[in-house]
Amino acid sequence: MPLARRVSSLDGLRGVAALWVMAFHFNIFFLPQARLSSVVPFLGRAYLAVDLFFLLSGFVMAHVYGRLLASNWRAHWRHFALARFARLYPLFAITTLVVVALVELYHAPVGGVSFSFQSLALQPIMLQQWCSGLSWDYPSWSISTEAEAYLFFLFFSGFLLSGKCPRLMAASSIAVLSTLGIIQGGGINYFVGLPALLRTLAGFSLGVLIYRFYSLRTGVAGYWVGVVAVLLLGLAAITHIDTIAVCGFAFIVYGCANATNVFARFLDTRPLVALGNWSYSVYLWHAPMSFAVTGVLAAAHHPVSQLDMLRARLLLFTTACAVVIVAAFHYRFVETPIRQFVRRSTSHLGP
């Protein structure tokens, strides 16, 4: 299966989103006394970075695999499934095992996160989002729904990319997010069960439809795309309606994919593209790293809960840097070799 040209500016955008999510989780589960919300803009709603991930995932899957799957998914499903498995599962399995080892070693409870056997039993089959709450390597709930979105895309790529009434499809995706928001007073921070899956599928489908519009090469001015994105994000900040923010992200993804504006060129710089390559590792390693730091300091009789704001911020920054270093190492020596091996092993499945 030939690979489409990478849209490197979207890698940079994904890297920024990964850091945003890490800061959000560290502010809640790791060092709340660091009060990051006072220095990081919109940190209280940084869970929306996950919705940006879903948009990006839909766009990239459509860009790389959409044409072939839409034309004949039966001929290409094995290659698609193995490539996605190689991308998602090894890192997910490694980080989950690390969390299990850390919990067994330090027995350190984390508020709002379950370490039950029931939730652990769902981890190997990537159904952890169907637990009653966040569990083990807690950011991985979205990896569960992402895998389900891939299955959805396998069967519905043709409908999304070439079916009639694409505007109606986009409106339906936005309507699903709006309905979820109405139920929760404007927020869509769902991470368990059917609502989490609907949140994922709506964002993923919207990403595919953005690619469909992008592939038409309509030449919509990047300036106006940026203006609309800023207006929507500003309106979302005022109204606290998350669906409006997701619509703003949709314009950002479209604008960055064209890579003609200043923001897109900034995201296309080497450091941010590298961070984008490491983003999946950053996303799944930041919880285990925070558990490890908490456990080690607790064993040394220096619990993190007793740190003042300045020391908490210093420890948080140091841990975040360590996460990025581990992510870079993992991408270079684990993720990349595994994906290359799978690509070589399945080359006979391609056209």
Image (cartoon, grey):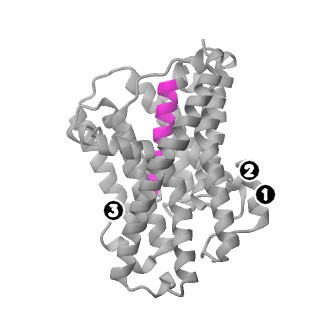
Of the residues under marks 3 and 2, which one precedes in the sequence?
Answer: 2
Identify residue type, mark 1.
Ala
Say which of marks 3 and 2 sits in front: 2
Q: Which amino acid does label 2 sit on?
A: Pro
Q: Does the magenta stretch include residue 238?
A: no
> Which of the numbered marks, if any, corresponds to residue 196?
none
- Determine which quarter of the picture holds residue 300: bottom right
Please identify, in this view, whether the residue under mark 1 or under mark 3 is nearer the observer. 1
Residue 268 in the image: x percent, y percent?
29, 38
Q: Mark 1 points at which residue?
A: 121
Q: Is residue 53 magenta?
A: yes
Point out the tag, 1 or 3, that comes first from the N-terminus.
1
Q: Is mark 1 on a helix, strand or loop?
A: helix
Q: Position of residue 324 (x, y in %)?
A: 42, 55
The residue range painted magenta reads 48-64
Q: Is 69 located above or below residue 181 in the figure?
A: above
Quadrant of the snapshot with the C terminus: top right
Disc 3, SS: helix
Binning the other alpha carbons within 10 Å of mark 2 as few (below 14), some (14 to 19) or many (20 upward) gives few
Label 1 close to label 2 by CB (< 8 Å) = yes
Mark 3 sits on what residue?
A: 238
- Residue 104: image location, x then y, percent: 70, 71
Find the distance from the CA under tag 1 to the CA under tag 3: 42 Å
Answer whether labels 3 and 2 touch (C-beta < 8 Å). Answer: no
